[in-house]
Amino acid sequence: MNEKEPDIIEIINPATGERAGTVNRCTKEDVHSAIDGAEDAFSGWAAKSPRERGKMLFLAAQEIRNKQVGLAELLTAEQGKPLSEAKNEIQGCAAVLEYYSSISGTVRGDFLPKSDYGYSFTVKKPLGICGAIIPWNMPVLIMAWKTGPALVAGNCLIVKPSSKTPLTSLKIASILHRCGIPEDVLPVVTGSGSEAGSALAESRKIAALSFTGSAETGNFVEKLSCGTGKRLTLELGGSDPMIVCRDADVDSAVAGAVAGRFYNCGQTCTAVKRLYVMEDIAEEFKRKLTEKVSQIKTGNGMMKGTKMGPLIDMEARDKTAGVIAGIQEDYDAEILTGGEIPDSPDLKCGSFLEPTVITGAPKDCTLFTEEIFGPVLPVAVVKNMDEAIEEANRTKFGLGASVWTTSLKNSFEASEMLDAGIVWVNRHLKIPPEVPFGGEKESGSGRENGLCALERYMKEKTVIMTP
Ligand code: NAD
């Protein structure tokens, strides 16, 4: 017989192994009652004007900015990222809410040319009750990506944070509630993916579900949702390539690679996960990269000077360390820096791993073919742009990609040829709220951010009027 799971989930600080907080373990029944509550609240919420709803988001964004230090400290405690990165994420969350508030007055349909049947126009309506399933790596920013457009459009949204990082999301939700958004319009169900997450995916009452997480879970959620008639957005994993051309500004490419791979301890969907550098500049690039990466100060995100925190938990750390060990065992690859689990007393209780750069591994090994969600950067040398593009596209993923060059021709050619939902030139990672974001191939379908996310949370009704 299965032992009943405890009613409480413990949230563990990945830097110390200590308890950062506890939340309720919501059951399927809890999710169903949140859906029922949202159904009751929907008509009142949908009847408000988009601008009225947008104003509440704006007020919430202001309060989030005012409280950013406390919120960032909580985010660091539950997720591990350095405090400066946590502050960035809290500010990013506020910026997304402000953006959707600012475009709330633009919700509109179309007036169509007069036909033989009279006048026709379309109106935009909310979908109803929507769901949001959120991962642990950027819990607050991703919550805003879904909450902003869903609420402005007039939907209720049931939020399911990752059971590893629900604490800051709960605080953000309570700020939104205080700013006028009813709790039944925006309930947060804390619980496991298999119980609370599945209940959202399986429910026929959920009109749209936006899922962000791994490709594996996303595929499973797609199966659970099949036949329920819901609109599904899947924002899944990636293995973003970065191409450094021979005409690149090497120093800025090195800085871009360091930030692109080691931000959030390498646990970002659009992190630089594979790097292809052209042979003419490869030695200089690798030398400078190794120097910079070996200077990254790893530690508790609350400590001044920390540049990289721990991985989310010991399981994630051991998995990534296992990949490094496997590569060393199987191939004649060279670890340029890092590769070890640090053993200093202050890091012993946390899930830390040294920032690692590997070169010489075959271009078709796990490092290049799978999503490695940790601080490991494999560097491969290529002859020219053709080879770089071929290698970059040789993947099942298609989330982001970047090319580093001073040539206009290379910029256009690469942005045209790379199979990715977003291509950066001389940059990697940053995405402003108005820019559509999403993947292709196994990195998912649908878009978040920008006007298109707002459209995704609305349906269109056509009216034909014969005078
Ligand atoms: P995950 O797939 O393990 O979990 C994501 C969410 O799904 C969590 O809330 C989890 O509880 C829930 N879940 C788990 N099983 C479920 C089920 N059976 N039914 C419904 N929900 C379920 O992912 P993670 O480890 O939290 O996040 C890391 C992954 O997310 C990486 O692959 C990363 O690339 C990806 N990611 C993608 C984007 C993007 O926008 N494309 C952004 C951030 C993270």
Image: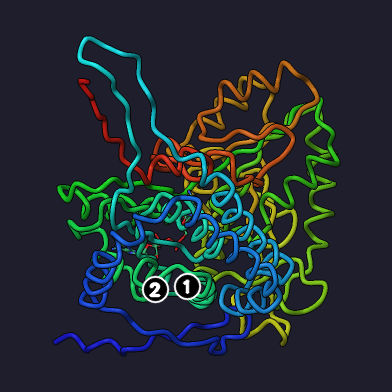
Q: Amino acid at mark 2?
A: Glu
Q: Amino acid at mark 1?
A: His
Rendered view: 449 above or below 402: below
Q: Position of residue 68 (x, y in %)?
A: 68, 72
| In front of the other: 396 or 58 | 58
Q: Which residue is mark 1?
A: 177
Residue at 50% over, 29% down? 419
Split into quadrants, the picture shows ligand 1 in the one at bottom left
Rendered view: 425 above or below 214: above
Report whether residue 318 is seen.
no
Q: Most extreme residue toward the top, as rendered?
A: 116
CA–CA distance between discs 1 and 2?
6 Å
The secondary structure type at the circle numbered 2 is loop
| In front of the other: 438 or 399 | 438
Determine the image quadrant of residue 376.
bottom right
Report whether residue 290 is seen.
yes
Q: Is mark 2 within 8 Å of ligand 1?
A: no
Rendered view: 137 above or below 232: below
Residue at 76% over, 27% down? 405
Q: Which residue is mark 2?
A: 183
Could you classify mark 1 by the number of other residues whose Cα lies within 10 Å: few (under 14), some (14-19), or many (20 or more)? some
Determine the image quadrant of residue 304.
bottom right
Of the 4 image quadrants, the one containing the N terminus is: bottom left
Residue at 42% over, 74% down? 163
Q: Position of residue 338 (x, y in %)?
A: 71, 62
